[in-house]
Image (cartoon, grey):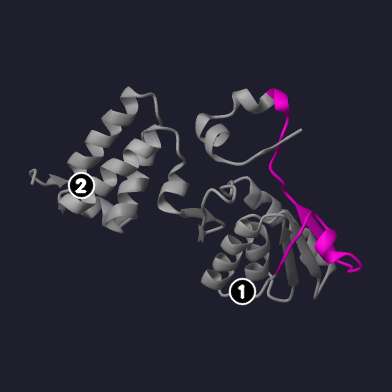
Amino acid sequence: MTEERTLHEALKWASSFLEARGVEVTGAKWLLEDVVGKSGVLFQLALQERLPEKQWQQFEQMIQRFASGEPAQYITGEAHFYGRTLLVNPAVLIPRPETEELVELILERGEERFQHPKIVDIATGSGAIALTLAKEWPEAEVSASDLSGDALHVAMANAERLGVNVTLREGDLTEPFQGEKFHVIISNPPYIPEKDIEELQTNVRAHEHIWHL
């Protein structure tokens, strides 16, 4: 067994490893926090603690995957959105911070106009938008659809994790809701123009499923 490293030493090694390969080093801290189950102040206070060999091996493998271009969220299986933690895997896109602005806009304008609205989120993926709206707007009746059954499994797991009731249906775009009426229809699909594909970061281009225009 090799000598155990402190969290500080492990973080320093990972940062150097990633920097030498031109990869964003901030991902190292996030991955190490996930390994040790501590974040923020608790993580900072633990930097001089020893990292057990099993956790070191886990962290080393995660850093190698991250260096190869795999998104940190797929490695940990979690992503942060609107102050909450969602489950993610390659079956869904990673929720983006800018999508929170869409949620804010819907809440701001919708709550002024509707008391008990029916809302549908098309191509929901992880369920980030639909589940957040259901959580933030309890009076709303929220539904969501996705063409991918695997994506809906992720959305369902997130609904259970957040403790919200959202109707999830499998199908193409609005097809699962034909004949139904809604006050708010949302869709934030992963469309990317063909000409922009090569300009995407490697971790997005190689690991996230995007639709070409």
List the residue tagged with mark 2: 7
Q: Residue 110: image x %, image y %?
A: 79, 63
Residue 5, compared with residue 86, is above or below; it is above
Tag 2: amino acid: Leu
List the residue tagged with mark 1: 164
Is 83 positioned to the left or the right of 24 in the image?
right
Quarter of the image for residue 137 reads bottom right
Is residue 51 among what the camera can see? Answer: no
Q: Which residues are magenta?
A: 168-195
Mark 2, residues whose alpha carbon is within 10 Å: few (<14), some, or many (≥20)? many
Quarter of the image for residue 12 reads top left
Residue 68, compared with residue 113, is above or below; it is above
In the picture, the quarter occupied by the C terminus is top right
Q: Regarding mark 1 in the picture, which secondary structure is present there?
A: loop
Is residue 113 among what the camera can see? Answer: yes
Q: Residue 26: image x %, image y %?
A: 38, 38
Tag 1: amino acid: Val
Residue 15, compared with residue 42, is above or below; it is above
Is 155 positioned to the left or the right of 36 in the image?
right
Is 62 positioned to the left or the right of 139 in the image?
left
Label 2 or label 1, whichever comes before in sequence order: 2
At 64% from the left and 27% from the top, the residue drawn is 197
Q: Nearer the viewer, residue 159 or 98?
A: 159
Q: Is residue 137 magenta?
A: no
At 51% from the left and 30% from the top, the residue drawn is 202
